[in-house]
Image: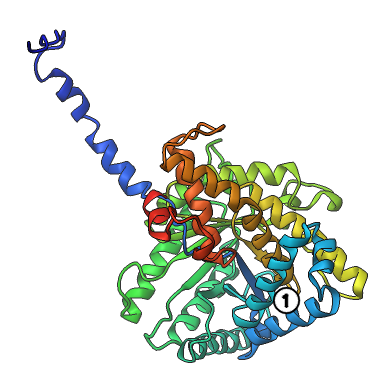
Amino acid sequence: MSAPVPRQSLPTGLAAGLVAQLSEVDSERARDYPGDRLTDQPVHTCYVPAGAARPDLLQRWGTSATEALRAHASTPTELAEILDLPAELARRVHELLLRKLLTQPVEDLRFDFEDGYGAPGDDIEDADAVRAARILADWHRNATAPPYAGLRVKSFDTAALRRRSVRTLDVFLTAFDGDLPSGLLITFPKVTDVRQVEVFVELLTALENQLGLPAGTLVFEIQVETQQAIVDGSGRLALPGFVRAGQGRVRGLHFGTYDYTAGLGLPTASQHLAHGSCDFARHVMQVSAAGTGVWCSDGSTNVLPFGDRDAVRHGWRTHAQLVRRSLDHGFYQGWDLHPHQLVTRYAAVYGFYRAGAPAVATRLSDYLGHRGSAVADEPATARMLAAFLLRALRCGALDPAELPPDLTPDQLDALA
């Protein structure tokens, strides 16, 4: 006996006509929220004043970090003491850390022409821009370049800074003679108004046309270090408009700790990454970037691991605590200003992923296998569990062989 046909109240075609109105919403969402880019985000960005750019810069950073590790945390036991890690975890982290420092100490680098550089004069800045470009080009020819590298230009705050910013970017890009390296990123600092982003996009388009580059080649990051980058003059959140104005060119939002906290009038003792005002700004960044494919990066700490043994260890503890805090808040990238910070950057990142991976892998295996579990995970949570493991694999904290047999990298990628 066939089941009875259910009764309906709406006229034929009415429901279909109503929901058809949302097709434009679907198109806009697909355009503006293509999904997060998970597997290729660097764990940090290192900032180096452009005047200090040297061909052996990457090796010098790696050597300096390795020597500091061997001098002040030569054994897993010492590293465990400094970073408060369990002994077995510290043993594996120490091994991974040393290998990373010896093979690829820097994942992302900016030649800084802004706050860390100053205003030495046009002739000097022109020469430094050409030299930085040639160094980066040589690294790529020699297959020694980090996955990402580029420059931070001056802000658009004043007419003089705008002129110099445009000139430096032009000189830097022109020095490549049309052979732009992969992974090139430009950092645009102290943005206060969406119109600055609009003009910057027009500038990049003009440079592409003049240099014979395909449209969309030049991409950039917005530094979030002004109050107007969080809330605009009308009281609206500014960053969603900044990202839209970027027309697909915005690759990241980078938090600027000290400009932001100083702009709020905080006393110097309160100008640090763990302050509540920074949490508010970072959460706005996350909400604005979620699902867009735009990376969020935390800022820096100016407590450097430099000096005698006690000073280095104090700087390491401070840095590691802040890196772990950023990771706990969903910020998987941050700034490093000194070679010795590479030690705690990678140690904290590896420790974070290795400590969490067993429980994450078990939860995800239970979810995919429809097995009973004490935690009832939603599909969205499962996607984030997969993303956690993918990030752990990408940064080198985990090896694929350490995953359960039912969790291959391809499966994780499909799920995330």
Q: Quadrant of residue 410?
A: bottom left
**Residue type (three-letter) at the residue carrying disc 1:** Pro
Task: Residue 140: give x, y in percent of width and height.
Answer: 47, 86
Q: Nearer the viewer, residue 276 or 170?
A: 276
**Drawn side of residue 24 relative to residue 395, left or right:** left
Question: Does residue 105 sit above or below 134 in this rendering?
Answer: above
**Drawn side of residue 270 relative to residue 60, left or right:** right
Q: Which residue is mark 1?
A: 339
Q: How many marks can you see?
A: 1
**Drawn side of residue 320 relative to residue 395, left or right:** right
Task: Residue 124: give x, y in percent of width and height.
Answer: 63, 87
Q: Please name the residue shown 73% across and 46% down the image.
A: 264
Sort mark 1 into few (<14), some (14-19) or many (20+) by Cα contacts within 10 Å. Answer: many
Q: Please name the residue shown 92% across and 75% down the image.
A: 308
Task: Residue 381: give x, y in percent of width and height.
Answer: 49, 40
Q: Please name the residue shown 59% across and 62% down the image.
A: 189
SS category of the residue bearing label 1: loop
Task: Residue 24: give x, y in percent of width and height.
Answer: 24, 37
Asked if one can make out residue 259 in the rendered structure from this viewpoint, the answer is no
Q: Quadrant of residue 46?
A: bottom right
Q: Nearer the viewer, residue 5 or 77?
A: 77
Quadrant of the image containing the N terminus? top left
